[in-house]
Image: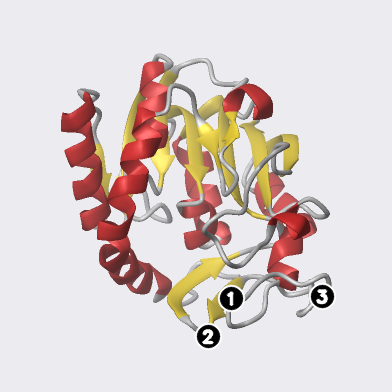
Amino acid sequence: MTSDAPADHVEINRHLWNSWAPDYLASGERAWANSQPRWGIYQIAESELGLLETFLGGDVIELGCGTGYVSAWLARLGGRPIGIDNSPLQLANAAYLQKQFGTHFPLVQANAERLPFVDGSFDYAISEYGAAIWCDPHRWIPEAARVLRSGGRLVFLGNSTQLMLCVPDDWGAATPELLRPQFGMHRFEWDDDPGVEFHLSHGEMIKVLRTSGFEIEDLMELRPPAQTEETKYPFVGLEWANRWPAEEAWIVRKR
């Protein structure tokens, strides 16, 4: 993919997340209130997953911060976060929750594919969904590398490759069967969802990461904890998620 390829998804996704913002305030409030981070669809506790084991504090950028709860977690752990998001109404939610919980950090409206920061501004970059699925990895991952200092880490979590191959076009429940080819995975648009998502196969993701100057430290394929109940997300059932990973998290380090 070339740098001059169309980027209409930026505006499409901004409008989508502005429209969804009222629906995410309550869940954002619950996440802010968590005594420890809980990740993804199945709310896996940080003590079980260890996604932040490499976090050592410092200057942090959250790429697609939404209501800002991940940045709040990292602030409590001694980081100095900046939350960026494409949606001004999501940032308004984050500002409201900052006042409610008394934890403040800068919030910037920006597109993770074109960050308004100079090279080498941050020690750590993170995205739980956010840029991880709503931005083009051919654009946002090189940008993350640009604003990270040497040795800085990027951590991102989103839907798994397996899930994207097995979810129907109408975003119904994932099936045990492959419904689309793995070769050529990139831009996803669903029949009943006006947004634009991006997902790569593992091989393609490795190429993008290495080309951007990252070395891969870990790829975590997430499984629901024991005694987990079904979630509100209709696109993946608990039985499916206990057989194949519904989500995956990458930890990479800038060379």
Q: Mark 3 or 1, which is nearer the eye?
A: 1
* Labels 2 and 3: the sequence-earlier one: 3
**How many other residues sit within 10 Å of disc 3, few (<14), some (14-19) or many (≥20)?**
some
Quarter holding the C terminus is top right
**How many other residues sit within 10 Å of disc 1, few (<14), some (14-19) or many (≥20)?**
some
Residue at 71% x, 69% y: name it.
174
Q: Residue 46 in the image: x percent, y percent?
A: 59, 26
Do the CB atoms of the residues marked 2 and 1 lie less than 8 Å apart?
yes
- 89 above or below 14? above
Give the structural element (helix, strand or loop) at label 3.
Answer: loop
Residue 128 is labelled as: none
In this rendering, position of residue 97 left or right of residue 137: left
- 228 above or below 131? above
Query: Which residue corresponds to mark 1?
Result: 171
Residue 191 is labelled as: 2
Closer to us: 140 or 245: 245
Closer to us: 122 or 118: 122
- 191 above or below 104? below
Query: Which residue corresponds to mark 3?
Result: 178
Q: Residue 199 in the image: x percent, y percent?
A: 63, 63
For badge 1, the amino acid type reads: Trp
For badge 2, the amino acid type reads: Asp
Give the structural element (helix, strand or loop) at label 2.
Answer: loop
Residue at 74% x, 34% y: name it.
218
Q: Residue 146 in the image: x percent, y percent?
A: 48, 41
* Labels 3 and 1: the sequence-earlier one: 1
**How many other residues sit within 10 Å of disc 2, few (<14), some (14-19) or many (≥20)?**
few
Residue at 65% x, 35% y: name it.
251
* Labels 2 and 1: the sequence-earlier one: 1
Residue at 37% x, 68% y: name it.
13
